[in-house]
Image (cartoon, grey):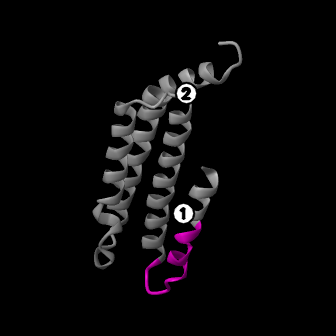
């Protein structure tokens, strides 16, 4: 499982060598890809312990969609730091809510499931 994810991450490495793309746009793309990798890894781990439900997966899908359809990272002709900040703050807020809600529940269940004798 981890080897598959690492291979996927290595396949994305050529992105960093594209000199024609502004650094801020590369940073956005790296963050989008890191988010996708993180969410896939978390889903696989939770599924392994039988603790991933459809609502949790749907929440991840919404986060990925929102992160990848954001305009501040799509149009290099309109670099607007204010829009980027709003985008980053939106992602941060999603993580805070998700971590204290769906993740907290799923991780408690997984912790209980992986303990011997429970």
Which dot marks residue 60? none
Check if mark 1's residue and mark 2's residue have beta carbons within 8 Å.
no
Whether 15 is among the magenta residues is yes
Q: Which of labels 1 and 2 is toward the front?
A: 1
Tell me residue 106's x, y (percent): 50, 26
The residue tagged 1 is: 8
Whether 101 is among the magenta residues is no
Q: Quick check: 113 left or right of 40?
A: right
Tell me residue 17's x, y (percent): 54, 82
User: Which quadrant does the C terminus fall into?
Assistant: top right
Which of disc 2 and disc 1 is earlier in sequence? 1
The residue tagged 2 is: 107
Farthest bottom residue?
A: 20
Q: Nearer the viewer, residue 74 or 49?
A: 49
Tell me residue 91's x, y (percent): 40, 47
- Above or below for 95 versus 85: above
Q: Which residues are magenta?
A: 10-22
Tell me residue 44's x, y (percent): 52, 42
Residue 49 picture quarter:
top right
Q: Residue at the location (55% across, 35% down)?
A: 48
Secondary element at tag 1: helix
- Above or below for 64 versus 31: above
In three-dimensional space, the C-alpha distance between marks 1 and 2, rounded to whole angstroms, equals 25 Å
Q: Nearer the viewer, residue 85 or 99?
A: 99
- Above or below for 107 versus 117: below
């Amino acid at each position: 499982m981890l080897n598959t994810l690492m291979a996927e991450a290595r396949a994305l490495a050529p992105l960093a060598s594209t000199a024609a793309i502004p650094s801020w746009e590369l940073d956005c793309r790296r963050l989008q890809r890191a988010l996708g990798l993180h969410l896939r890894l978390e889903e696989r781990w939770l599924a392994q312990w039988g603790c991933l439900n459809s609502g949790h997966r749907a929440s991840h899908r919404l986060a990925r969609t929102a992160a990848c359809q954001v305009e501040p990272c799509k149009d290099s002709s309109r670099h607007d730091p204010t829009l980027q900040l709003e985008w980053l703050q939106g992602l941060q807020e999603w993580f805070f809510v998700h971590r204290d809600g769906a993740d907290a529940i799923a991780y408690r269940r997984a912790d209980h499931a992986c303990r011997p004798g429970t």
